[in-house]
Amino acid sequence: MHPLFSPCKARNRSVCAAAAASQYELRVCVNRTCKRQGSEQVLKFAQDLGLPSVRAAPTGCLGNCGSGPNLVLLPNEQLLNHVATPKDLAQVLTAFCNFQIDDVLLQATQLRLAGNAHAAQLEFRQAIESYTQALELKPPNGNHMLYTNRSAVYLQSGDKKASLDDARRAVGCAPKGFHAAHVRLIDSLYALGEYGAAAEACRQAAAADSSFKFLPEYPAIKRALLGTGQTL
């Protein structure tokens, strides 16, 4: 067990109803203190793993504020403290669920998170380098997120062609419901002035998954394309 993990029974009884469809459920506190300590990236990593027998979801305060990020593992109501990084979470899954997380996937995820941090600071070159290094590792999954994120950074940095290439790769390997890849494709085509192709990409995304039309970005995409004479 990780030396910082402090297991105890969960105090918040409202989180103690595990999802019937999953063998395990991780509830990660995203309240103010745990959020500052990195709980959101831990939750995102847990969700990105896509393990069929593990469901990850946010929850409110679990107590022990200051010892976070905190999460509770159901159904055994195990409260764990100081789960601050993807590596910590991987060790939790190994210790309590007997899951072995691929080292390459873990390294790629850490590089992706580093790239995201660089992108947030508008450090485009460093962000692209981080995403590229992660892709070069050839992780077993998660490539759609790497291509999507790198596409966004390429577009922000002015390299529209590279953005389009990555967006196409992202759409090609993204699971159903991962709409960000389709948004990147539409953005890249629009930026290149390929309005008809952008409209067609939008129609295809909506046809593949009708929930695409309920994205917060969809009204702006629709207005922009209508402004170029395209119909959806």
Image (cartoon, grey):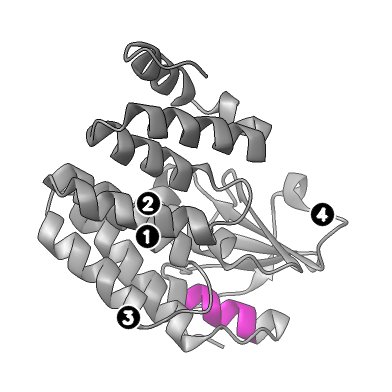
Between label 2 and label 1, give the one nearer the viewer: 2
Cβ–Cβ under 8 Å for marks 2 and 3: no
Q: Residue furthest right?
A: 20
Labels 2 & 1 near each other (Cβ < 8 A): yes
Please give the range of residues in magenta. Answer: 88-94
Per the rendering, the mark at residue 136 is 3
The residue under the point 85% across, 58% down is: 21
Q: Where does the image place residue 149, in percent across and percent down from the top left? A: 33, 54
Q: Earlier in the sequence, mark 2 or mark 1?
A: 1
Mark before the other along the chain sequence, 4 or 2: 4
Query: Counting residues from the N terminus, which is met first, the one under dot 4 or under dot 3?
Result: 4
Is 153 left, or right, of 30 in this rendering? left
Q: Amino acid at mark 3?
A: Glu
Measure the C-alpha gap from mark 2 to mark 1.
Answer: 6 Å
Which quadrant holds residue 71? bottom right
Distance CA(mark 2)–CA(mark 3): 17 Å
Element marked by disc 4: loop
**Residue 178: horizontal and vertical position, in percent?**
55, 48
Give the residue drawn at x 19%, y 57%.
118
Residue 92: in magenta span = yes
Q: Give coordinates of residue 222: x percent, y percent.
A: 44, 18
